[in-house]
Structure formats: structure tokens, C-alpha cells
């Protein structure tokens, strides 16, 4: 179907149904913007909701199929215009702003051995006059970076996103911001004051003087007017985070500290320790000794506990140590950390020791301190400081690696390749399309205001200007195959192979909420994808001979994720069989849906109380005998609050995660489709209905686990039930905002 827009403005074409005869109709599930012909100089082509492999395409449609793909690829030249539907690749050369001076220069990520990275969608914006490799940026927060029209937020979602952002800005513009802008950094004076100031419904904000001038320099005029209106009309408060809602001190317990490694924001990092003591980069041996930990191993020796697979490690040492000297030169006080934990008989994790390390004399040496659990006196307070420094490391890894790199950035090349190489008629296009909704737009917004030089992430997270560069170093070892949940659990020593299990693996211990719920969701996705692929591909030869799917896979590996092409066997499966295609697509859908949900939608529940997940530190742990240690002994709480971020950084970070943690009214969850007529194949619709039924069974099992008091990690001391992988298939948008549950189809926020 060809559509011509002779009007002056674009319109959103949702669907078209043509009544061909009394008993037959043809449905077009469009969901696409149609721009005026005077801008596009071409009709818009739409294909009916019937799926065809390339070899099965009716003769009358073959040339149109190829023509549409050619149009979507473009020619790689020029700046993209709003109405252009062109998908092409570019490096991350839009993070720096050299025109503001050398402090805003950032390395270009992608395309070199020094800075490997996934690719983003090309915009073709003009290059900086100061650096002919870096794209120019607007001087105010910009929502208008090019995103192909059909991958933008809908008007309804954009309006809701702006509204949520304005509310967050208003929460951020508290009275103390004025003094911060004028050069004064203020701390919270007590934990009680922090809770009162951040979550009290009685605080109000005023916009005046330098605060207003700063906001005018940052925000579009329309934003400013709305901010002023909201400030005048609304009392301001953040909602109370779940982690302190029941017990405001539970977050400080060792039990909750360990539990959040299994059911918190960053639950896919902890791994089983394979040898003791731990050994890091360059063969450097940890300073943690058997004598440090054996008193807490329930009678086991350190070696025996390792052999029994009961010692686990949260390791933030090697990758941080590479950057640590430069990070701390920015004025922060960060360690590289290793945390050892013991799996008790009740399947909870008991912290054993924390090693905090700093660079040594510049010749590769390190300065290490080992902290042990304590329950009273100054030792208890020092142990709390050590746990806080670990939480800072983990917060940075969570936001930069687990969240941004492993979901947002990793998925974008797949979207570009899908649009360029798979026709809208292709069954795999129809399978993947809902899992790409809004991802490119949110990534564009992230590059505009979060990840850019001087942006919110650099202002709040401990790596500062080295944040994205550090994520590039970690991407060097990223492997797509290992993002599959069963392989990830095997790699981390959390599971063993077991062909008798639906997922093919068996957990070493069952009370690991992320893993056990995740495997249930994984199996549901895998079953749906496997049945779908088998329906369209009768044998392996039909996969190998599918030119579009092979071009898609080649482009993902050699262009979109081209910096990982040297690790072909470790990173990618060959797409030569139905089984490998099913595994590849299951992994991609898992990343875009469940993995992102697990690391995103619990942010406010856990990090909404800053002491639980601080993002940087301003002081090191004092050494005994120093004036700082005496200061610490006089008032440990005061020292703690001077160590964690100040009010400005804290409130800015809270405003960000409040926006990121919420579902919008347009959210489409796993097992749902925006349209019931996305395909005309009754067999496929039946398989999809079965997928929804399987997810509802997962929901029931999660509810049963959360009600089982014997599973102590399901809620923990803070009484936060684990629901981040609860699919929420019945939620049709009425339950929105910060819910802490629901798996959207895509990386949509």
C-alpha cells in the first residue's frame, strides 16, 4: 500500500484495513509517521501483516521489498532531517563539547582498538570547529537530536516524559541549590535531617536570582515556564523509598548488604570464588588472608569453603584500579574493592571481609586495607564506612555497565541492523519490533543530558569524566553469547549444567531471586521464540539460505558491534541453524526486556535512599592516629555524611532515578502487543497467547516465592519483596509510575 500525504503536516497512521471482498480483508499494522510529500518526495510504502521469508515473497512485492530497504539505509551522507527514515551507524563522537574548552573534550568511543564501543544511530550533525571529529551540541538541554520518526516517543509518551522530568527538576530545585550555585557546598547534618528534607511533604522551593539564571542557561524556555508553574502549585517531596519504608535502619545490616547482591539493583555481578586468596590483573594477590575469614566459615577452612562453592566475591578491583589515580585526581576519594561473602546454610550471604585498594608508588604496587565485620564501637563504624565504599563502586558499575552498556548501548546496533536489513514483512522483524520500542530515543536523550561531558552522570557518579571511557574498557571483553542468562550463571559459577532442567542449568542454591525468577522468564521467552522460529524455518538450510537474516547478522557482528569482531567464536554464534537463531533471538529479547527491567525499575526502591547506594565519596576511611581518625571518633555519623555526596549531588541523583524508575501509561509489557492484529497468522497468535499464559504462571510462582518465609532473600531485613522480574502481563497502563514490577518489552526508559 502506497500512502501520499498532500497536507502540510505529518500524521501518525496507526492502521488501515481494506475490505477486499465480503469475506476477506487485508490489514496494515502501520504505527508510522507519514510526512508531507513536499518534504519526502516519495510515497510511503506499507506492507500487510502477512509474514514472508525473502524466498517466499510474492513476485509483485519483491522489488518493493528491496526498494524499501534501500530507502531505509540511505547513502551515509548529510545531516539527517526530521522527516527522514534513515538508519545508519556512527561512533560515539557526540559526548564531548570541545567548543567549551579542553575540560569538555572526551575521547570518541568506537572504531579504534583504544576505545571499542557499540555504534549509535548516525545524525550527521555538523562537526565542531575545535575538533573536526566531534559533533556539535546545542547550548541548552536538547530534545531534538535526530531519531528516525518511527523510533521516537509517541506524543503522549513524550508529554508524559517531559512532565515527569519537570517534576524531577522541581524536586531538585530546593532552597539549598541557590547556595550551591553560588559556590557553597552543604552537607546533611544528620540522617534524620536527610529523611526530613528529602521526603517531607512540607518543604517548598522558590526560584529566584542565580538559580533561575542557571536554569535558563540549561533548559528550553517552555521547560522553564512549566517548572515555575509546578513550583508555585505543588508541595515538593520525593516518595519514601521502599528500602526505608518499613525499617529506616535495615539498610545498614550485613544481611541486607549481602542480599542486595542477589536481589538488588546489580544482581548479575557476584560470582563464586574459584581460588583463595583472589588474584587480580597482572597476578597481584589479594591481601585478604585465611585468618581474616575463617572465624566466620562455620568451622570450614578457607580452602574447604572454596571447594564447597560457599565463598562468593563482589569484585570491583581490576577495572577500577586501571583508572583510579586519574579518578581521584578529580577531587573524589574512591577505592577499588573486593568483597568476600559466605553462603550460609539458610542461603543468605554473610560478608566476610572487604579489601579496599589504592594505587601505590606508581610502579604497579597497591596500598591495601582489609576491613572485617564488627558489631560495636569504632570498629562497627569503620566497617560501615567500608561497606559504603563498596556500595559506591557497585553503584557506578550498575549505572555505567549493567544498565547503560549491557542494555541501552548493546541493543541499539541490533535495532539499526534490523531496520536496514530485515523487511517489515520478515517474520523475525515482526518478532523483534516490539522489543525495540523507544530505545533509540531514550539513548539519544541520554547522550544529550546524562552521558555528555559535564552531564548529570559525570556530576553524580564516581568516575566523573572517565565514566564512558571506563565503560569502553569493559566493553573490550563483552560477549553477546554470555548475555544469555544460563550462560551468565554458568560463567559466574552460580549454576551447573543440567539437561533435565528446562533452562539447561541448575542453580547451586535456590534463594537467588534474580536468578530463579530470571530463569523462569528466560524459559518462557525461549519457548515462544523457539516455536516461532521453527514455524517459519522448517530446517537449518532455510536459515542459512535466508539472505536478509544472514545480512542482518553479518552487519550486527561486523559493523554495529564491529569492535568485537575479533572474538568471533567467543562472542557470536554462527547463524547456521534454527537452534542458533532461536538462541540468538532469545538472548536479544532477554537483554531488551527482562535484563533491563531487573537493573532499572528498582532504582528508586534501593537508591532512592542515598546512604544505601551512594554514588561517590568525598573522604577516604581515616587511618588510626591521624587527626581525621580523631574527627571520626568524635562523631562517626557526621564523618559519614561528610564522606558521601553533598546535598546538591544527592538531590540531582534522586531526581534522575525518580524519572528512570517509573513506567509510563503507554508501557507495553512482555507478553503484550500494542496491536492485536500485528500478524494475520492464527497459529502465531495462538503461540503468542501461550507465551502470555506461561508468563502468568511465572507471576504465580513469584508470588508464591515471595510468600515463602523460608526464602529469606526474597524480602530481606528491609522487607522489599523481589518483584523486578514479575512480568505484570495484566497491566494495561493503569498502574504506572514507580511500581517496582513489570517487564516492558523494550529498553523504553
Image (spheres, helix red, strand yellow):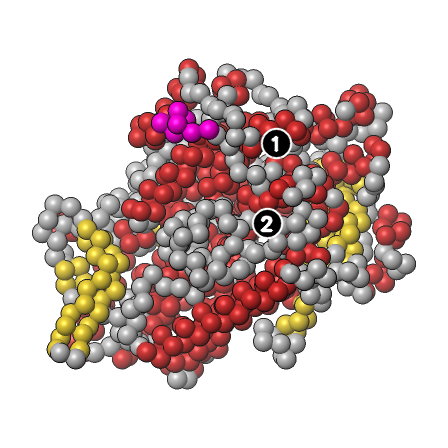
Q: Position of residue 265 (x, y in %)?
A: 59, 49
Residue 184 lies, with reference to residue 496, above or below; the image says above
Q: Which mark is residue 195?
A: 1
Query: Residue at the location (63% across, 72% down)?
Result: 505
Separation of residues labelled 2 and 1 (CA atoms) = 21 Å
Side of 56 where 386 appears, left or right: right
In terms of sequence position, does the residue under pointer 2 or pointer 1 come before the other?
1
Residue displayed at 66% across by 57% down: 714
- Give me the disc on residue 265: 2
The x, y position of residue 428, in whole percent, is: 36, 70
Dot 2 and dot 1 residues touching (CB under 8 Å):
no
Mark 1 is surrounded, within 10 Å at the Cα level, by few (under 14), some (14 to 19) or many (20 or more) other residues, namely some
Foreground: 588 or 567? 588
What secondary structure do most residues of the magenta stretch adopt?
helix
Q: Is residue 9 magenta?
A: no
Depth order, front residue of 291/592: 592
Element at badge 1? Answer: helix
* 680 left or right, relative to 640: left
The label on residue 208 is none
x%, y% of residue 75?
Answer: 25, 54
Any part of residue 485 in sight = no
Q: Secondary structure at mark 2?
A: loop
Q: Residue at x 49, y 75 (%)?
A: 527
What stretch of residues is rendered in magenta? 229-235
| Snapshot quadrant of residue 21 | bottom left
Residue 640: image x %, image y %?
71, 30
- Image position of 262 (left or right of 600): right
In front: 86, or 16? 16
Amino acid at each position: 500500500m502506497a500512502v501520499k500525504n498532500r497536507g502540510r503536516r505529518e500524521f501518525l497512521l496507526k492502521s488501515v484495513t481494506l475490505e477486499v471482498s465480503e469475506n476477506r480483508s487485508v490489514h496494515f499494522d502501520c504505527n508510522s509517521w507519514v510526512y508531507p510529500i513536499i518534504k519526502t518526495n516519495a510515497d510511503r510504502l506499507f506492507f500487510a501483516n502477512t509474514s514472508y521469508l525473502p524466498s517466499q515473497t510474492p513476485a509483485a512485492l519483491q522489488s518493493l521489498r528491496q526498494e524499501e530497504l534501500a530507502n531505509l539505509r540511505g547513502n551515509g551522507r548529510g545531516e539527517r532531517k526530521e522527516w527522514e527514515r534513515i538508519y545508519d551507524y556512527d561512533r560515539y563522537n557526540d559526548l564531548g563539547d570541545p567548543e567549551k574548552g579542553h575540560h569538555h573534550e572526551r575521547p570518541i568511543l568506537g572504531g579504534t582498538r583504544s576505545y571499542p564501543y557499540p555504534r549509535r544511530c548516525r545524525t550527521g550533525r555538523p562537526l565542531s570547529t575545535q575538533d573536526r571529529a566531534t559533533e556539535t551540541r546545542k547550548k541548552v538541554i536538547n530534545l531534538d537530536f535526530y531519531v528516525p520518526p518511527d523510533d521516537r516517543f509517541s506524543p503522549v509518551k513524550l508529554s508524559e516524559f517531559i512532565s515527569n522530568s519537570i517534576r524531577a527538576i522541581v524536586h531538585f530545585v530546593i532552597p539549598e541549590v541557590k547556595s550551591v550555585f553560588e559556590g557553597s557546598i552543604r552537607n546533611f547534618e544528620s540522617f534524620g535531617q536527610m529523611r526530613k528534607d528529602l521526603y517531607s511533604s512540607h518543604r517548598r522551593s522558590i526560584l529566584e536570582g542565580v538559580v533561575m539564571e542557571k536554569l535558563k542557561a540549561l533548559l528550553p524556555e517552555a521547560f522553564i515556564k512549566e517548572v515555575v508553574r509546578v513550583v508555585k502549585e505543588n508541595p515538593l517531596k520525593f516518595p519514601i523509598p521502599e528500602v526505608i519504608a518499613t525499617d529506616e535502619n535495615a539498610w545498614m545490616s550485613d544481611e541486607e548488604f549481602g542480599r542486595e547482591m542477589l536481589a538488588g539493583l546489580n544482581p548479575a555481578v557476584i560470582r563464586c570464588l574459584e581460588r583463595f586468596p583472589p588474584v587480580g590483573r597482572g597476578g597481584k594477590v589479594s591481601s585478604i588472608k585465611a585468618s581474616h575469614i575463617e572465624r566466620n566459615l562455620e568451622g570450614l577452612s578457607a580452602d574447604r569453603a572454596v571447594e564447597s562453592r560457599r565463598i562468593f566475591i563482589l569484585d570491583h578491583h581490576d577495572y577500577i584500579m586501571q583508572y583510579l589515580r586519574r579518578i581521584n585526581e578529580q577531587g573524589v576519594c574512591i577505592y577499588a574493592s573486593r568483597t568476600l561473602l559466605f553462603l550460609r546454610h539458610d542461603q543468605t550471604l554473610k560478608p566476610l571481609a572487604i579489601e579496599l585498594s589504592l594505587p601505590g608508588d606508581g610502579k604497579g604496587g597497591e596500598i591495601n586495607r582489609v576491613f572485617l565485620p564488627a558489631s560495636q564501637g569504632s570498629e562497627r563504624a569503620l566497617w560501615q564506612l567500608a561497606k559504603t565504599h563498596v556500595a559506591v563502586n557497585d553503584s557506578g558499575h550498575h549505572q555505567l555497565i549493567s544498565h547503560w552498556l549491557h542494555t541501552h548501548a548493546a541493543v541499539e546496533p541490533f535495532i539499526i541492523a534490523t531496520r536496514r536489513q530485515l523487511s517489515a514483512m520478515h517474520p523475525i522483524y515482526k518478532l523483534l519490533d516490539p522489543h525495540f520500542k523507544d530505545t533509540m530515543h531514550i539513548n539519544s536523550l541520554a547522550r544529550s543530558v546524562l552521558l555528555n561531558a559535564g552531564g548529570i552522570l559525570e556530576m553524580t557518579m564516581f568516575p566523573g569524566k572517565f565514566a564512558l571511557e571506563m565503560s569502553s574498557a569493559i566493553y573490550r571483553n563483552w560477549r553477546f553469547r554470555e548475555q544469555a542468562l544460563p550462560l551468565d550463571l554458568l560463567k559466574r559459577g552460580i549454576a551447573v549444567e543440567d539437561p533435565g532442567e528446562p533452562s539447561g542449568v541448575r542453580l547451586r542454591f535456590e534463594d537467588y531471586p534474580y536468578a530463579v525468577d530470571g530463569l523462569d522468564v528466560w524459559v518462557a521467552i525461549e519457548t515462544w521464540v523457539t516455536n516461532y522460529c521453527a514455524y517459519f524455518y522448517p530446517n537449518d538450510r532455510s536459515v542459512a539460505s535466508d539472505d536478509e537474516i544472514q545480512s542482518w547478522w553479518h552487519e550486527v557482528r561486523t559493523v554495529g558491534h564491529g569492535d568485537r569482531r575479533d572474538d568471533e567464536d567467543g562472542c557470536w554464534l554462527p547463524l547456521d541453524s534454527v537452534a542458533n537463531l532461536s538462541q540468538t533471538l532469545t538472548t536479544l529479547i532477554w537483554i531488551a526486556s527482562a535484563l533491563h527491567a531487573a537493573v532499572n525499575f528498582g532504582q528508586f526502591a534501593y537508591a532512592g535512599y542515598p546512604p544505601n547506594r551512594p554514588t561517590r565519596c568525598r573522604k577516604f576511611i581515616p587511618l588510626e592516629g591521624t587527626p581525621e581518625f580523631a574527627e571520626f571518633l568524635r562523631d562517626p555519623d557526621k564523618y559519614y555524611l561528610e564522606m558521601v555526596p553533598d546535598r546538591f549531588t544527592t538531590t540531582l541523583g534522586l531526581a534522575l532515578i525518580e524519572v528512570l524508575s517509573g513506567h509510563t501509561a503507554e508501557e507495553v509489557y512482555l507478553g503484550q502487543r500494542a496491536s492485536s492484529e500485528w500478524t494475520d497468522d492464527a497459529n502465531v497468535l495462538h503461540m503468542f497467547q501461550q507465551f502470555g499464559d506461561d508468563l502468568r504462571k511465572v507471576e504465580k510462582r513469584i508470588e508464591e516465592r515471595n510468600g515463602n518465609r523460608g526464602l529469606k532473600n526474597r524480602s530481606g531485613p528491609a522487607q522489599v519483596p523481589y518483584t523486578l522480574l514479575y512480568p505484570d502481563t495484566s497491566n494495561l497502563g493503569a498502574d504506572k509510575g514507580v511500581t517496582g514490577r513489570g517487564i516492558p518489552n523494550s529498553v523504553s526508559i
